[in-house]
Amino acid sequence: MFKKILFATSATEATDHAARVAFNMAQAYDAQLFIFHVLGVPTRGYSQVVLDVKTKEEVVLDDEYVAWVEEEIKTHYTKQLETAQKTEIKVAIGFPHREILRAARELKPDLIVMGGSTGENEDSVYKKSLVGSTLQRVAKAAPCPVLVVNRPAASFWGGMSNIVFGTDFSKASDAAFKFAIKLAKTLACELHIFHALDIGSVHTGRILTQDEIETKIRESLRRIRGRYLPDMDGIGDYNFEVWEGIPYIEVVKYARENHADLIVMAHHTQKTSGEDTRLGSNIEQVIVRAGCPVISINR
Amino acid sequence: MSEDIIIIDKDVSHAKALCVYLERKRMESHVAASSEEALMLFDNVGAKLVLADPGLPDTDMISLLTGIKSTHPQVQIIIMTPPDHFDLTMAEIKHAAVHYLLKPVKSTALDMALYQARSWISLNHRLAATERKLQKLRQTQNLYQQLFDEVPCYISVQDNQFRLTATNKMFKRDFGDEIGSHCYSVYKHRGTVCQACPVADTFADGYSHSTEEVVTSKSGKQYNVLTWTAPIRNGDGEITQVMEMSTNITEIRQLQDHLTSLGLMIGSMSHGVKGMLTALDGGIYQLETGMAKNDKERTQKAFEQVKQMTGRIRKMVLEILYYAKSRELRYESTNIVEMADKVVSDAMAIADKNGVKLEANISPTLGIIDVDPTWMQAALVNFVENAIDACTYDRSKKGHIVTFDAFELSDDRICFIITDNGMGMDQETKEKMFTLFFTSKGSQGTGLGLFIANRVIRQHGGTITVESELKKGTKFHICLPKSKPAQSGMVHIPETLETTVNNETDDEK
Amino acid sequence: MKKILIVDDDPNIIDYLTTLFEDNGYTTIAAHDVQEGLEIAKKEIPDLITLDLEMPEEWGPRFYRKMSQEKSLKNIPVIVISGLSGGDHAVGKAVAFLSKPFDRDELLKIVKETLNV
């Protein structure tokens, strides 16, 4: 299923949790792993002067420096590299999201693996409780699924047996569903199809009664059955569930309760309403809060 | 304003002199020299004072004056008379005159006389006014007494020691004439003041208070009443007594209770009804499709089903109607054996359908019994059907049998014994069995059948005893007197409800 | 052919539903109570279950609870058919709730939609 994995990393402790997952997966699926590091943000246009990501000092860019960085990366992952088979370290200079997307176009991986957020500093390219712009932009435009391991808590993972697919019945969700099905079938996993019923009064205009909510839940369950069940041949064990609440919280809770190893959701490319962009869309919040890796599909 | 005075004197000059004097006293004098003139004056002038010399020995003036006094008692007459006629004049006129003056009249004497006359006039005036007021007062008193007595509530007035100082007619009728007794002993047969006494509250704060109470009449009957108290103040505004008015709402409360349990009943029965209606739907569906497919067996079965279901629904509707009104039993001399046979044949269909054997042992010489055949039969069928149901629901064994025995216990008593080897009853069921709405039949039970059957038996003066063991079976002993009992000991349902329902439905025989 | 399990304590209702479903091309199996229902369901794995709520001993929702704990049974769609008012949310994940007496065309429609047949 995964032949090539592109792992975008800062090669610091900050992305170690993502690294763990990336290496695990590469090993489990015998995939070729590209360890991809973006070297720093250029201070001016196309100049060769860069800021080192770690030290924030200006550095003169030359082949020597690049080679040195590669060594640093190798050192950092020494342990993993001992057991890993097909790995390759690649370094690029530029804006992280651009470079990652460029690499993805070139290398054509089946999966991009990223950490969610790293540094604490204001000027770090990754932010903690909001999805960093790098992740946002990569997830939005990536030509393949993007696996995000946002928190260290999301990285303790022994294998894939429980997948939670979160849907909002959109076309984008359908695409994500196809991926989830393929994954579940290939890996013989238990598949959970989950829909969160948004009961926020902003969307419905008022507070719903419990009976109304439960009627809606029943409708949603029927929709799930109608929309997804026909394609479920070959899946041994599955579950449908609809919970009411604030969508991203319900997804995270459901995944936690069911010991999910992975959450699969669609990444929305449409513009969301003003309110949503402030909070971050559902998937972004799920990414940030989930206790397991989250795969975002955008096509 | 000047006061009018009539002067009657033949002596014109004397009269004139008086006029002048009186004018000074701001009085307007009208002079008459003869009786005719006097009469005329009197009619035209509204004078209250008359100053007259009767002019003896002529007697016509005397009679005129006494006449005036008797017809117009408020007119005060002062008599002037020369000394030689004084005694005679006085003897003639006596009390018709208010004062006697000697002629020639001295001014001081005249003043005194006028003063006296005027006092009398004003006193009389006041007296008349007071009498009118008194009259009015008496009328008002009468009116209030009538109201007090005729109002269809109990009214009692208590002082601050809770002693009754006044009671109205209705109160006297139901509680006795208990002036001086304590209200709490008369109303509630207590020895001390009641807990939340509204009378006490009104004494305390001067406001009206309203409560609902249960009071006991002198005959021991209990009534629900709505009580209202009001303060009675004396001239200084202090509360000296409190009036207590109680309206009898016993009938309303009974009606309420009845309606509530009716509502309860309908609510609890609706589930059973829904089950029956669905089963009826099923029967009809199978009938339709059976006929369309020319499936004789299905059609036959479906028809039986529809019959059975409509029968059950009919039974339930009758039960509701029964409960909705109290029914006087219509006794008829009934052949016991015939009735028992009919009970068995009615129940046979259901027994067969559910694979339960129904055996009857009816003694052939049971004779005649005074019963309401409709209800007695329905009650007995109810017991038998319950027995069949107990078997149907019992999964613990096969081979269920219900026996119906009818025999003579004594010359005037017969008994029915209904036995089954069905699921039996636990302690709770046994205890609650005859209570309203208790059913152990889940969706099939209405909770009404046994309650009504029990009532019917009791109304006839009969008895029921039960033996039952869980999972083993049940036995009902029902014994009835052959002749109608003297008293039926029935629970009375308010007349008002009965009359309205009776007017609407009377399709039963 | 799709198999429907009917769970209801009233034999008349079972009779009705059995005839109704079989007339419309489904096979049916029936149970009178929760215990029997579970046994039969585990053995036969029906495609759909109709469930009554109020039954002697255990009630419908208990059946549903136990059913959801069985891997083989938990995803079988359930239609609740009951006379109990207010029962429409007693089994939250039921596909539909119909009150007794029910409209048989509506029931058939829901069954058809649920089974995609």
Image (tube, helix red, strand yellow):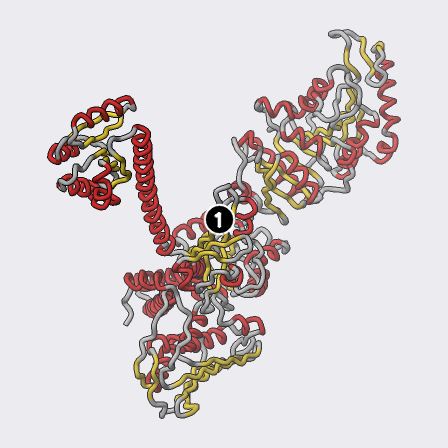
Residue at figure coordinates x 63%, y 56% from the top left: C70
The foreground one among A26 and C35 is: C35
Residue lying at the far front of the rendered structure = B84
Q: Is residue B461 above or below residue B410?
A: above
The image quadrant that residue B261 belongs to is bottom left
Specify whether C64 is left or right of A84: left
Q: Which quarter of the figure is the C terminus of chain A placed in?
A: top right
**Three-letter residue code for mark 1:** Thr
The foreground one among B161 and B466 is: B161
Let me know if residue B445 appears in the view: no
On what subunit does the disc labeled 1 rest?
C
The foreground one among B133 and B69 is: B69
Specify whether A45 is left or right of A245: right
| Within-10-Å neighbours for mark 1: few <14, some 14–19, many 20+ | some
Q: Which quarter of the figure is the N terminus of chain A placed in?
A: top right
Q: Percent position (x, y) of residue B345?
A: 36, 80
The foreground one among A165 and B411 is: B411
Q: Percent position (x, y) of residue A38?
A: 77, 19
Q: Is residue B302 above or below residue A57?
A: below
Q: Is residue B246 above or below residue A221?
A: below
Let me know if residue B57 appears in the view: yes
* Residue labelled with disc 1: C114
Q: Percent position (x, y) of residue B154?
A: 42, 57
Specify whether C113 is left or right of B27: right
